[in-house]
Image (spheres, grey):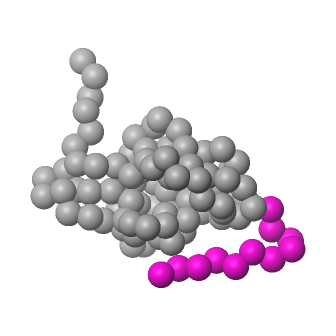
Amino acid sequence: MFVRPFDSQQKAVPVVIDGETVMAAEGEMLASVLLRTVPFYTRTTPVSESRRAPYCLMGVCFDCLAVVDGVASVQTCLVPVRAGMRVERQHGRREVPL
């Protein structure tokens, strides 16, 4: 789907997505990494659990939400990649601890 070629100016760093290690350019937006990583979605909706993927890529639509380093509902289009990030696709409703 989306392939990002690396050039000699970019530093490739490992990011763990749903338990799989993926290489990404340090500083690129996390949403772009998720768009090119199978399966090509970031979350499922709370009601129908249909798959959603980044849409606006500027922080307006909230379709790019994922769990980043244990924090749920992070807008991945606004988060730059850094080495060692742990990302999980967000499924359905969030559980709120009582």
Looking at the image, residue 2 sits to the left or right of residue 41; the answer is right
Q: Residue furthest left?
A: 48
The quadrant holding residue 33 is bottom right
Residue that lies at the very extreme toward the right in this rendered image: 8
Taking the spot 55% from the left edge, 44% from the top edge, the residue there is: 86
Q: How many labels, in total?
A: 0
Q: Which image quadrant for residue 29? A: bottom right
**Residue 91 on the magenta span:** no
Q: Main secondary structure of the magenta part?
A: loop
Q: Is residue 85 above or below residue 62?
A: above
* For residue 7, side relative to residue 74 (left or right): right
Whether residue 37 is visible:
yes
Most foreground residue, 98 or 12: 12
| Residue 82 location (% of width, % of height) | 68, 50
Q: Is residue 3 magenta?
A: yes
The residue located at (66%, 44%) in the rendering is 84
Looking at this view, is 18 or 33 the one in front?
18
Residue sitting farthest toward the top: 98
Q: Which residues are magenta?
A: 1-11
Q: In this rendering, is residue 14 above or below 41?
A: above
The quadrant in which the C terminus is found is top left
From this view, report whether residue 92 is shown above or below residue 2.
Answer: above
Image position, residue 60 (x, y; %)? 40, 64
What residue do we see at 19% from left, 50% from top? 46
* Residue 80 visible in the picture: no
Q: Residue 90 placed where, x, y %?
A: 34, 49
Residue lying farthest to the front in this orientation: 20
Q: Residue at x 72, y 55 (%)?
A: 13
| 41 up-or-down from 8: above or below | above
In this image, 52 relative to 20: left or right?
Answer: left
- On the image, the x and y values in percent for residue 17 come to 50, 52
